Amino acid sequence: MIRRWSRGQWLLRATVVAGPVIALLATIPAGNGPPWWLVLLVAGIAAAFAVYPDSSAGTGAYVLVVVWWGLGLRDGLHPAALLAATGLLASHLAATVAAYGPSTVLLDPAALRRWAARGLLVLPAAVLAWVVAEAAQDQPEPPGLWAAGLAGLLVTIVAANLLYVRKPA
């Protein structure tokens, strides 16, 4: 099956694997690099996800990266978190496009452009979240902060669904 992948499929699937690994290694500039076995574990799970992009294997790789970031950086956020977010987003988008059809099918340039544009629309949310987290780091937590954050997330999800989910004609 792997031998029949087109050059574009190889590139997509390499991105599926590289994204979580890059996100995990992005903790090195923050001062807490992952152990070698964790890098190999994430790479292995991500490789399984690259072969089967419509499986839930990607969730395992992404969760391990997020847990490592959460456990490893207790002193706050580092700008390398933006690199990690970009890696995870690129991996997710590449897996989404790779799962569109059989691995032998050539990639549709219009689909690639569409998903790249969606990724570029989502990425500023990571930057905004990082900026807000940095600004609020040493501030006392106001009452209702979590409720307001969840309400804002809910509004964002509903708005995105209204904008991007098309109803059948």
Image (cartoon, helix red, strand yellow):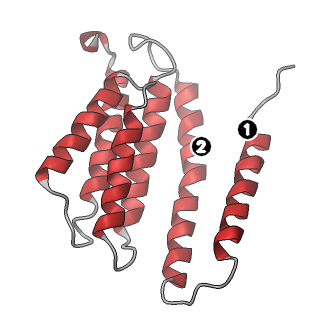
Q: Residue 124 appears in which quarter of the rendering?
A: bottom right
Of all residues shown, which one is farthest toward the right?
169
Residue drawn at x 24%, y 56% as measured from the top left: 25
**Residue occupying image coordinates x 71% and y 70%:** 148
SS at circle 2: helix
Q: Check disc 1 and give the amino acid type.
A: Tyr
Q: Position of residue 41 (x, y in %)?
A: 21, 41
The C terminus - image quarter: top right
Residue 149 appears at what percent x and percent y? Answer: 66, 67
Q: Which residue is mark 1?
A: 164
Q: Earlier in the sequence, mark 1 or mark 2?
A: 2
Quadrant of the frame with the N terminus: top left
Looking at the image, do the residues carrying marks 1 and 2 touch, with CB atoms under 8 Å apart?
yes
Left of 36 or right of it: where is 139?
right
Q: In the figure, 153 relative to 101: above or below? A: below
Which circle, 1 or 2, is nearer the viewer?
1
Secondary structure under tag 1 reads helix
Residue 118's disc is: 2
Residue 5, quarter of picture? top left
